[in-house]
Image (cartoon, rainbow, N blue to C red):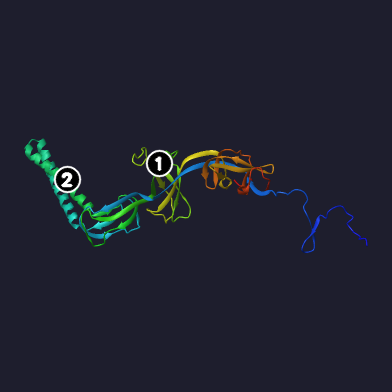
């Protein structure tokens, strides 16, 4: 018995495939399609790029003095305590001075008597009625009395201890009623307006550092950086270290800043004006080569660059790109030269 074979009347293959859910999904015809890589771009900006030398040191007072007793005696009065700000010449301490006052009074009386005798004999000498040796003795006695009076007054002045400069009392080493001896330490004072920092820069890095330059200072217990001023630059190089001493002055600072505070110092040693800067994240380093990716006509173009100074989150580009180039700053890590890209974030007006 003959068999009947039934076939489809269509010569085309079915281009649809049924999914597991029973729905039909169209298969893609032709070759595979590469999706463009999403990127963000930015234009280089022109600004100043600076090179810094960073070091650390401690804040110092402008003057630091240990005040010692110049006379012996009992402390009668204490006028100032630790932490007090005083003017130059302010009396800090008074020793008992009864003996010194009496000696000064006695020296004054002897001077008055010697002066009277000297003047009397001077008149008689002019009249030629006094021997020369008697006049000479009176003159010597008068000069000696003047010297004795000056010594007595100086001894009396040593019973008062005064501030040698405007500043702050930082330590007191003696108590009321105590007996002090000549040379004993009584106080320590510091001149704290301004405070100073002394840093030592390698001679090869001194660059453009000059008096009145601004210096950025970061102090541990202060949240914001402070600005110091270069006060002195040593004219010589230390032959043992190859460094040059730079003294920095800090005129204004918060109350919590004190001598001895640990401070980071950033000194500008070189400047490049009106130079091209791009975000540092855009720069890729590979096998000692540095390059960026630029966006041109929907494609990524790899471009080698030469770097200059790093300024915060920006890097100076000395050659390789132009001011009008569209630098890729997001998505660049996954790019190859010539791949398709699509800009999803144009930061050209935000990046400066």
Disc 2, SS: helix
Q: Residue at label 1?
A: 202
Can residue 249 be seen at all in this image of the molecule?
yes
Q: Which mark is residue 147?
A: 2
Does residue 342 appear to the left or right of 92 in the view shown? right
Q: Where residue 157 sits: x, y (%)?
A: 23, 52
Q: Where residue 65 sits: x, y (%)?
A: 30, 51
Residue at the spot 40% in from the left edge and 45% down from the top edge: 248
Which quadrant is the C terminus positioned in?
A: top right
Q: Front-most of 99 and 88?
A: 88
Disc 1, SS: strand
Residue at the spot 13% in from the left edge and 45% down from the top edge: 114
Q: Where residue 180 sits: x, y (%)?
A: 22, 58
- Quadrant in the rendering for residue 71: bottom left
Q: Front-most of 158 and 311?
A: 311
What count of labels does the image hold? 2
Farthest residue, direction front: 1
Does residue 291 appear to the left or right of 179 in the view shown? right
């Amino acid at each position: 018995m003959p068999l009947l074979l039934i076939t489809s009347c269509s010569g085309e293959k079915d281009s649809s495939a049924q999914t597991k859910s029973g729905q039909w999904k169209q298969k893609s015809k032709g070759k595979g399609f590469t999706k463009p890589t999403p990127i963000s771009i930015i234009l280089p900006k022109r600004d100043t790029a600076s090179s810094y030398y960073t070091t650390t040191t401690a804040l110092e007072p402008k003057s630091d003095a240990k005040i010692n007793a110049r006379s012996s005696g009992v402390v009668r009065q204490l006028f100032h305590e630790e932490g007090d700000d005083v003017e130059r010449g302010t009396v800090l301490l008074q020793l008992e001075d009864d003996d010194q006052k009496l000696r000064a009074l006695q020296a004054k009386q002897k001077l008055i008597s010697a002066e009277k005798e000297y003047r009397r004999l001077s008149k008689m000498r002019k009249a030629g009625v006094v021997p020369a040796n008697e006049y000479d003795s009176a003159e010597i006695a008068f000069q000696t009395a003047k010297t004795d009076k000056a010594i007595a007054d100086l001894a009396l002045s040593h019973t008062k201890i005064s501030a040698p400069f405007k500043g702050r009392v930082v330590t007191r080493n003696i108590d009321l009623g105590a007996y002090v001896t000549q040379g004993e330490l009584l106080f320590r004072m510091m001149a704290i307006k301004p405070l100073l920092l002394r840093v030592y820069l390698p001679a090869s890095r001194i660059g453009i550092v000059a008096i009145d330059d601004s210096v950025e200072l970061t102090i541990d217990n202060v949240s914001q950086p402070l600005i110091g001023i270069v006060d002195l630059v040593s004219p010589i190089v230390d032959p043992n270290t190859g460094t040059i001493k730079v003294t920095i002055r800090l005129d204004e600072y918060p109350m919590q800043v004190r001598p001895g505070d640990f401070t980071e110092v950033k000194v500008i040693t070189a400047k490049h004006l009106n130079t091209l800067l791009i975000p540092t994240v855009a720069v890729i380093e590979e096998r000692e080569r540095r390059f960026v990716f630029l966006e041109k006509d929907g494609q990524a173009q790899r471009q080698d660059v030469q770097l200059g100074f790093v300024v915060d989150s920006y890097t100076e580009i000395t050659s390789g790109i132009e001011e009008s180039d569209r630098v890729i700053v997001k998505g660049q890590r996954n790019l190859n030269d010539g791949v398709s890209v699509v800009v999803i974030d144009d930061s050209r007006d935000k990046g400066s």
